[in-house]
Image (cartoon, rainbow, N blue to C red):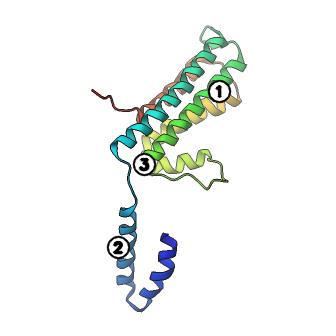
Amino acid sequence: MTKIFEKIFFPLFACISKKKHLFLRSLLRNSLQEKRQTMSTSEQQAVREQYYSEAMRYMDNAKEYLQKAGKEDNYYQDTKYVSTACGTAYKGLLIALDGFFILKDIHKPKSRQRKSIEYYQSNIAKMDKKMLNNVNNAYNILHLWGYYDGIHSASVVREGFDEAYRIIEKIKPEEVN
């Protein structure tokens, strides 16, 4: 609707000065954005509960896979289970980020496009630099080193899981008394 509105009304402003044009344009855009409905507190809580529980379910499954990998002297023995655990934990992280983006009213890419790490990084960079560092670390450890490379170091994998938990905690639902 915004684009149709702009095509109809903004050319009408051509006869006024550039400064007034920019001012009116920003007023119209702001009023259109204000009309966009925001989520109520109960809706936000429902989104938090849904995405948090799903992300934690993935993390629990990832922990089970790590237990199957067997650990000796701070190194996992079975690459298959480490790879599966890291991939599952990374998927849980992405679910949490999707919930975070819904809460922040960040729109998904067009339906035919897949979400890439760049999509997540660019949107998070606009909001929270510390969270961006957590995402980058989790991406490198869980997705690249853990899932693709099958890293065996338990301390590195544990750090990747910790980064994922820090992000998941951002959408943790509030306790109801």
Which residue of the protein is positioned furthest toward the bottom in this rendering?
15
Q: In the image shown, does 70 or 174 lie closer to the viewer?
A: 174
Badge number at residue 89: none
Q: Amino acid at mark 3?
A: Lys
Q: Is residue 152 left or right of residue 45?
A: right
Badge number at residue 104: 3
Q: Residue at (41%, 37%) from the top-left corner?
A: 46
Q: CA distance from mark 3 to mark 1?
A: 29 Å
Residue 107 image position (x, y, % from top left): 51, 53
Q: Residue at (56%, 37%) from the top-left corner?
A: 94
Q: CA distance from mark 2 to mark 3?
A: 22 Å
Name the residue that disc number 2 marks: 27
Q: Amino acid at mark 1?
A: Gly
Name the residue that disc number 1 marks: 146
Q: Is residue 167 visible?
A: no
Q: In the image shown, does 127 or 92 lie closer to the viewer?
A: 92
First reached walking from the N terminus: tag 1 or tag 2: 2
Q: Amino acid at mark 2?
A: Leu
First reached walking from the N terminus: tag 2 or tag 3: 2
Q: Is residue 177 left or right of residue 47?
A: left
Task: Look at the numbered disc 1 and give the secondary structure of its residue.
Answer: helix
CB contact under 8 Å: marks 1 and 2:
no
